[in-house]
Image (cartoon, coloured by chain):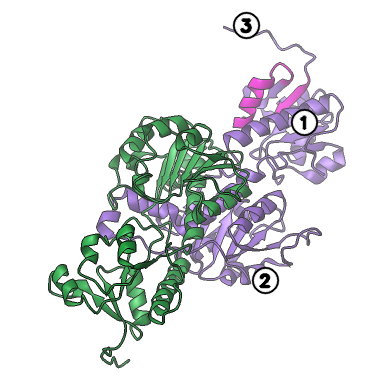
Chain colours: A purple, B green
């Protein structure tokens, strides 16, 4: 049995507002290097907790489930670093961080390959009806009803990638090997990318069979995939979303799927997770994943290393491993 | 309304022993070019039907569901061509065809891309638990039970491809783009292939995390994936089969899956289709597809063109489009 000695006072303090899976692993691995101040373990309101530690806290650790607003930052004048386990940053008030001189480090590209794998897996699944066919077999229908209906080929499909960051580029690399034709929409044209660029998603949807949504959720991308875009994609069109649920107007997506105005969808994310629109449960042309595109055992380990590496770098005055510009 | 005139006597006769989806399409498209003799539409036993048409039948059209044995060939002395809709040829007695001077044309590489897509789709699905996670979401478990367990990453997996023909090469090309390490087993080492070659499947299984079975079913490959090979693949190993069910000893596979002696399987084919071992229905680490890896609308159309092209070539004394050596 291990003997636990009390944490010495001089370990660097790292504030954690809410528990998470990554934090549990990180805490076990690095409790001998940092003093984690876990807000939820203190029997006092968070604002009181924050003001207690105000002057001593230089670093904060968070996940996408923690809103780091100006109100959270105000009582922490010593804060100089926020490390987040997410690649996305919509939960952090970045302008306020910039104003206050707080650096932010994120998951960077740790998840990009896994997310891209899920995007491609969902697309093959929807086109080739793998999950639906598995239900058919498990339901004992094969011997009774005979051959399962013909599916649709991946090769030759015109795929529009929305958001050509590290995830989008990994998706493109994979789908290229399947013989798909890639084009993309992004905030601006990428200088070293040969794929055709579309300035707006409506034109992209009009010219594609498949949309793969890989962009960040921002005020500009919120409900960017609306009814007009879905109708432009058309009756044979497929939407894959591994970004954030709110990039799509989910109510309109559900209507389009129910009415057959698009052909199918592969969705890892939803607007009100973990709630998923019940109408989708009955549809064979939809494959749903509970926001797990980012996580494999391998990427989870890589993430823990990166998070700890950022904290160590910060406290030894070295450059962060994955700073957000 | 179209007026149907009776088929003139001089159209080349093509014997068809059993109905199939491809034949239905082919017949509709080419009934003005060939006279299809459909054995199942005649109210006489097949052997009697065959002897009636013995001297006039030069070409036969079949699918993998038709056993073309020496007994079937014996009453057809004029037969010079068999066109099969399958890539595999285990249903045709090839030595007997050779002896009788009967040419065989098959589906060649028409299906290769689609089959490879399915193999990769099944592999991503098993590793990332897409179908199982879809059940989790549809079952309403996400809000109740919370985060779905971590899955396993595709990148970095050591994948052993068994049978590096056109399908195996397409699988390799795709998995390479995902960052997998490819090695293979085949009847012999391929001269222009850089992937490491393993002379026997046991060694391949020992050195791999994943086996993708892409080989033909022959006397040599029947039950080639036996208990020993599966145990060598090990507890974290995954088997993908898009070849033929009998390449695996299915009973042993089921036992290994039930006992957790391998990690999972993606199966498009089974030993006694359409029957599937019921034990698999309860397993979340298995994804089942009802032998549909070969078929998409696109490949089906390509196949119909190829089949008709072979018949047309034969009857105009031109070289076959997809002759079997």
Comparing A176 with A67, the one in front is: A176
The residue at which mark 1 appears reads as A310
Instruction: Find numbered disc 1 in the image and state the secondary structure of the residue it sits on.
Output: helix
Magenta segment boundaries in residue numbering: A12-35
Protein chain holding label 2: A
Depth check: B72 or A143 in front?
B72
Q: Position of residue B207 (x, y in %)?
A: 53, 33
Judging depth in this view, the residue of A112 and B44 nearest the camera is B44
- Residue occupying image coordinates x 41% and y 82%: B316
The residue wearing badge 3 is A3
Mark 2 element type: helix
Q: Is residue B141 left or right of residue A174?
A: left
User: Mark 2 highlights which residue?
Assistant: A203
Counting from the top left corner in percent of width and height, residue B279 is at: 30, 39
- Residue at 71% in and 42% down: A109
**Dots 2 and 3 on the same chain:** yes
Query: Reading the chain from its start, which is encountered first: label 2 or label 3?
Result: 3
């Amino acid at each position: 049995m291990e003997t636990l000695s009390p944490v010495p006072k001089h370990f660097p303090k790292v504030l954690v507002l809410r528990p998470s899976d990554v934090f549990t692993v990180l805490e076990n691995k690095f409790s001998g290097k940092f003093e984690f101040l876990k807000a939820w373990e203190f029997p006092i309101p968070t604002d009181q907790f924050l003001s207690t530690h105000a002057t001593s806290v230089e670093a904060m650790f968070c996940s996408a489930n923690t809103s780091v607003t100006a109100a959270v930052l105000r009582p922490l004048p010593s804060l100089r670093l926020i490390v987040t386990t997410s690649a996305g940053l919509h939960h952090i008030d970045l302008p306020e961080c910039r104003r206050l001189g707080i650096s932010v480090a994120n998951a960077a590209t740790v998840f990009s390959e896994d997310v891209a794998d899920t995007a491609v897996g969902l697309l093959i699944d929807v086109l080739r009806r793998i999950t639906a066919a598995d239900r058919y077999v498990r339901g004992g229908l094969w011997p009774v009803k005979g051959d399962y209906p013909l599916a649709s080929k991946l090769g030759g499909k015109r795929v529009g990638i929305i958001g050509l960051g590290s995830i989008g580029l990994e998706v493109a690399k994979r789908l290229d090997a399947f013989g798909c034709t890639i084009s993309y929409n992004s905030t601006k044209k990428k200088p070293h990318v040969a794929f055709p660029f579309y300035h707006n998603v409506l034109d992209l949807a009009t010219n594609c069979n498949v949309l793969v949504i890989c962009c960040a959720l921002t005020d500009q991308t919120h409900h960017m995939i609306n009814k007009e875009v879905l109708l432009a994609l058309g009756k044979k069109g497929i939407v894959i979303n591994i970004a954030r649920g709110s990039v799509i107007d989910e109510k309109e997506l559900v209507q389009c799927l129910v009415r057959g105005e698009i052909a199918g969808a592969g969705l890892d994310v939803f607007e009100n997770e973990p709630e998923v629109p019940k109408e989708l449960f009955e549809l064979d042309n939809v494959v749903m994943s509970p926001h797990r595109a980012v996580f494999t055992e391998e990427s989870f380990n890589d993430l823990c290393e990166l998070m700890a590496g950022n904290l160590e770098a910060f406290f030894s005055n070295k450059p962060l491993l994955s700073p957000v510009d």
